[in-house]
Amino acid sequence: MDRLVGIDYGRRRTGLAVSDPLRIFASALDTVDTAKLIDYLKTYAEKETIERFVVGYPVNLDGTPAEAQVHVDTFLKTLRKAFPDIPVSLEDERFTSVLAHQVMIDGGMKASDRRDKKSVDRISAAIILQGHMDRTSGATFAVNPDSVPESRSRNKTRKKR
């Protein structure tokens, strides 16, 4: 099945994530040196069918282009040239590093391991990709909360002893 690839582009290293075949979950894939990124993606594309690239796009809080946007734009030209038949979507990457750190804390990762920027890049790419999939899937909540009957335990009153 086709996969989506999430990219958290950086000038030195780039975090990558991939969707599961059903496109429900994004998983951190790898962190690669940016200089080797296109070659890595070509090798990956030989093993898996890539349907779309989802690239984190740097924007300031006020919606204006962030300083790093120039570098991402240059990368986007290279990516589109290397993979002309694979569409590229841009996803707002604001707060992804903060969210990645929180995921690592919530997951019980040691403080020393959380300082590894490669981990942050991979997890940021997964957050970017998951955000795109959630936004574009058209899925709705599987169960209408109003249709769930109240639990009997909530309806029972406790007897005083």
Image (cartoon, rainbow, N blue to C red):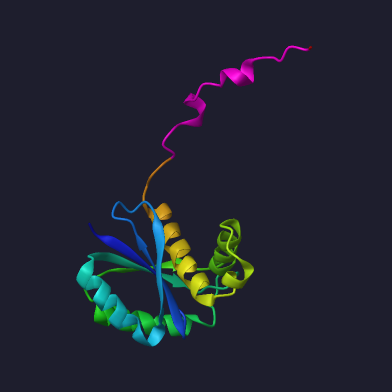
Picture residue at 51% right of the left edge, 27% below the top: 146
Quarter in which the C terminus is drawn: top right
Expressed as whole percent of the image width and height from the top left, the position of residue 31 reads 42, 75
Nearer to us in this view, 115 or 5: 115
Residue 3 vs residue 161: left or right? Answer: left
Picture residue at 59% right of the left edge, 58% below the top: 108
146 part of magenta stretch: yes
Nearer to us in this view, 152 or 134: 152
Which residues are the magenta region? 141-160
Expressed as whole percent of the image width and height from the top left, the position of residue 24 reads 36, 51
Residue 66 vs residue 158: left or right? Answer: left
Q: Is residue 4 above or below residue 112?
A: above
Expressed as whole percent of the image width and height from the top left, the position of residue 147 reads 47, 25
The image quarter in which residue 133 lies: bottom left
- The outermost residue toward the bottom is 35
Picture residue at 61% right of the left edge, 66% below the top: 110
Magenta-highlighted stretch: main secondary structure?
loop
